Amino acid sequence: MDLQKLTDDLELVSQRYAEVYGIRRDEAWFVLKLQEEVGELTQAFLMRTGQARPKGLTPAELRAGVGAEVADVLCQVLLLAKHLDVDLPAEVTKKWLSRLPPAGDPSAA
């Protein structure tokens, strides 16, 4: 999956959503929407792990709910990064991938 293409497609979906519901997508909205999705992921996780009432959902539905909420969080992160003009691949490389052990490092096994 191409991250830039995905982000561009998400932007189109988000723009349409904002138009339909009359939402102004400013910096606060992007951050608050991400927070909303993290809250929904937390609820789905608690339900799946038996730490909240399952609301009549089956184990398969609870698993699917967590997957759907993880996807929502990822999509909102990508939209926030785009809105704030964050070069996400560069930042991930700098913050995470720079810590990969060198190839052939015996301690990496």
Image (cartoon, rainbow, N blue to C red):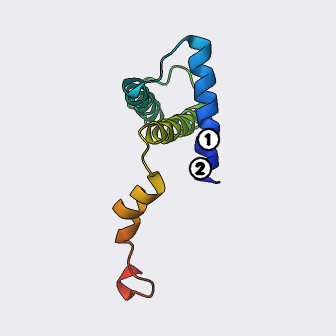
Disc 2 secondary structure class: helix
Q: How many marks?
A: 2
Return the mark for residue 101: none
Q: CA distance from mark 1 to mark 2?
A: 6 Å
Against 94, residue 57 (above or below) is above
Disc 1 secondary structure class: helix
The answer to whether 25 appears left or right of 7 in the picture is left
The quarter of the picture where the C terminus appears is bottom left
Q: Position of residue 59 (x, y in %)?
A: 57, 34
Identified at 45% across, 52% down, the residue is 88
Q: Which residue is mark 1?
A: 8
Instruction: Please tell me how crowded label 2 is: few (under 14), some (14-19), or many (20+) other residues with Cα within 10 Å.
Output: few
Q: Amino acid at mark 1?
A: Asp
Q: Amino acid at mark 2?
A: Gln
Furthest toward the top, the residue is 22
Closest to the observer, 61 or 85: 85
The answer to whether 91 appears left or right of 18 in the picture is left
Instruction: Please tell me how crowded label 1 is: few (under 14), some (14-19), or many (20+) other residues with Cα within 10 Å.
Output: some
Identified at 39% across, 56% down, the residue is 91
Closest to the observer, 23 or 64: 23
Q: Position of residue 17 (x, y in %)?
A: 60, 21
Q: Position of residue 64 (x, y in %)?
A: 59, 36
Identified at 63% across, 31% down, the residue is 12
Marks 1 & 2, CB-CB < 8 Å contact: yes
Closest to the observer, 28 or 57: 28
The answer to whether 24 appears left or right of 8 in the picture is left
The quarter of the picture where the N terminus appears is bottom right
Identified at 42% across, 31% down, the residue is 34
Q: Position of residue 94 (x, y in %)?
A: 36, 63
Against 37, residue 18 (above or below) is above
Q: Which residue is mark 2?
A: 4
